[in-house]
Amino acid sequence: MIRQARISAGMTQKTLAENSGCKQSAVSMFEAGKRDALAYDSIVKIAGLLKVELPKLEGERPREPVHEPAHGDLRPPFSFCPGFECPSNAAYMVGATVFLLPTGAAGGGKRCLMCGEAVSALCHACGAPASRQAACCAECGAALVPFPHADFAGSAAEWVRFHNDVLEKLRVKS
């Protein structure tokens, strides 16, 4: 409903995110069905901007896809920050493609300890649980933290160097 209203309004995810005070990655994940990608206040604000009436949920809780753990895998889900600019994700390149490796520094709460973005434990593309120390989903191969190549102006290699310099400075301070 939100996605269709945004498209009908001729608005990009980036513009909607800027106007509502959240991140484009969160808008993307929400439109892809990840209900907890946005705080309720952000959803209300987005609905207002798009002139969409939200349905009444009368006590219904959003449900996440259920995934059975792999045989013998009783570890808690791996939480990561889905924000590509977050210093909790280390950047690297393979050819001309940028990948972001969640380092675990986002913490295990609802919000990233580094940037405040809502953390995730699921692949935005297929809903499978995130694997520890992996840049891509083990189920579908999608990047856990997508890099916005289409929206990025400038050299990806320069961005990777800058991003990792920020990470190094944070490590030195710790």
Image (cartoon, rainbow, N blue to C red):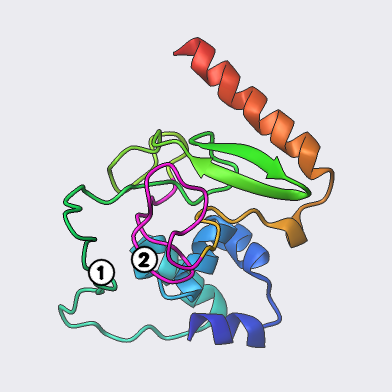
Residue 166: image location, x then y, percent: 62, 25
Element carrying mark 1: loop
Q: Amino acid at mark 2?
A: Ala
- Residue 103 shown in magenta: no
**What residue is shown at x 47% (from left), y 76% (from top)?**
47
Identify the main secondary structure in magenta.
Answer: loop
Choose between 53 and 90: the one closer to the eye: 90
The disc placed on residue 67 is 1
- Quarter the C terminus occupies: top left
The segment highlighted magenta reads: 117-140
Residue 36: image location, x then y, percent: 35, 64
- Residue 127 shown in magenta: yes
Disc 1 + disc 2, Cβ < 8 Å: yes
Q: Amino acid at mark 1?
A: His
Q: Which residue is mark 2?
A: 128
The reply, left or right, for residue 37 in relation to residue 151 is left
Tell me: residue 31, above or below residue 113: below
Residue 12: image location, x then y, percent: 68, 71
The reply, left or right, for residue 150 in relation to residue 138 is right
